[in-house]
Amino acid sequence: AQSVTQPDIHITVSEGASLELRCNYSYGATPYLFWYVQSPGQGLQLLLKYFSGDTLVQGIKGFEAEFKRSQSSFNLRKPSVHWSDAAEYFCAVGGGKLIFGQGTELSVKP
Amino acid sequence: DTEVTQTPKHLVMGMTNKKSLKCEQHMGHRAMYWYKQKAKKPPELMFVYSYEKLSINESVPSRFSPECPNSSLLNLHLHALQPEDSALYLCASSQTRGETQYFGPGTRLLVL
C-alpha cells in the first residue's frame, strides 16, 4: 500500500539552528515526492519536488531535500531556521492522487 | 504565476442552506482538485477534474456537488451540510493529472 510517514508530530528548534524534517514513503513505482508548507489558516505552498535526476533538490526559502531510494526517505533540511519558518510541513508522494503524511508542526524559539 | 484563488475566504452556513465555493486558476492547468482539511490533519482528496470531466470522486456524500464550468473554474456546491463538515476546503490545480499541484488559500467553512 502507498503511504507516507512523518515520524515527528512536533519539532521545536532555536532560531538560527539547522533543521531536518523526516519523511519515509512506501510506493510501488518510482515516486514523485513533494514537500509543502502550511501557515495557520492558509493553503499549502510548494517548497520543492522530486521527479527524477539529481537526488538533492533545492527549493524555495532556503530549503533542500534529499531523495534516498535505499532508505525510502525524502528528508527536508534547512541550514539556518528563521522565526517565519514556524508552520506545518507536509510530505507527499504520488501523481494524480497525492498521499500526504500526517504533517510535522515546526515551532521556532527566539 | 502559480496562483489559485478561492472565494469566499470564510463562510458560515446553517444546515438547511445552499452555498457554493469557487476556485479559479489562469495557469492553463487542465486538472483541478477539491480537498477537505480538518484541523491538525493533512488534506483529504474529495474530487478530481481532468479536462473538465470528473475523474475521481472519493466517495464524498451527495450533499457536496462539484462542478467544472470551464477549464479555469471549479465550484463546490453545498447543500444540507452537517456540523462535522466544518473544515478548510482547499482547491488545487495542476498542468495535467499527475503533475505538481498548486493550492489555493482555502475557504474556512463553519456549519451551524
Image (cartoon, coloured by chain):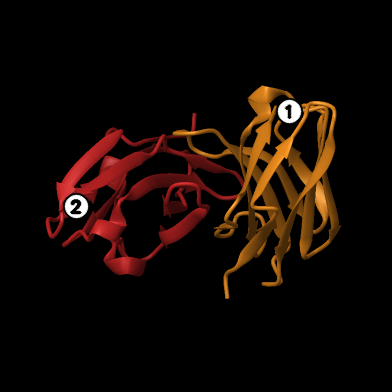
Chain colours: A red, B orange
- In the picture of the structure, the residue carrying the numbered disc 2 is A19
Horizontally, residue B34 falls left or right of residue A43, namely right
For the residue carrying disc 2, how many other residues have a C-alpha within 10 Å: few (<14), some (14-19), or many (20+)?
some
Chain hosting mark 2? A
| Residue B76 horizontal/vertical position (percent) | 78, 45
Residue drawn at (40%, 46%) of the image = A91
Horizontally, residue A30 falls left or right of residue B110, namely left
Choose top left, top right, bottom left or bottom right for residue B72: bottom right
Check the picture and name the quadrant holding the C terminus of chain B. top right
Residue drawn at (84%, 33%) of the image = B17
Q: Is residue B15 visible?
A: yes
Choose top left, top right, bottom left or bottom right for residue A77: bottom left
Amino acid type assigned to the residue bearing label 2 in the image: Leu
Pointers 1 and 2 in contact (C-beta within 8 Å): no
Nearer to us in this view, A27 or A37 = A37
Nearer to us in this view, B71 or A109 = A109
Check the picture and name the quadrant holding the N terminus of chain B. bottom right
Q: Dot 1 lies on which element?
A: loop
Q: Is residue A59 visible?
A: no
Residue drawn at (66%, 39%) of the image = B109
Q: Is residue A5 above or below residue A21?
A: above
For the residue carrying disc 1, how many other residues have a C-alpha within 10 Å: few (<14), some (14-19), or many (20+)?
few
Chain hosting mark 1? B
Q: Is residue B43 above or below residue A75?
A: above
- In the picture of the structure, the residue carrying the numbered disc 1 is B59
Q: Dot 2 lies on which element?
A: strand
The residues bearing labels 1 and 2 have C-alpha atoms spaced at a distance of: 38 Å
| Residue B40 horizontal/vertical position (percent) | 44, 34
| Residue A83 horizontal/vertical position (percent) | 24, 57
Q: Say the numbered circle drawn on residue B19.
A: none
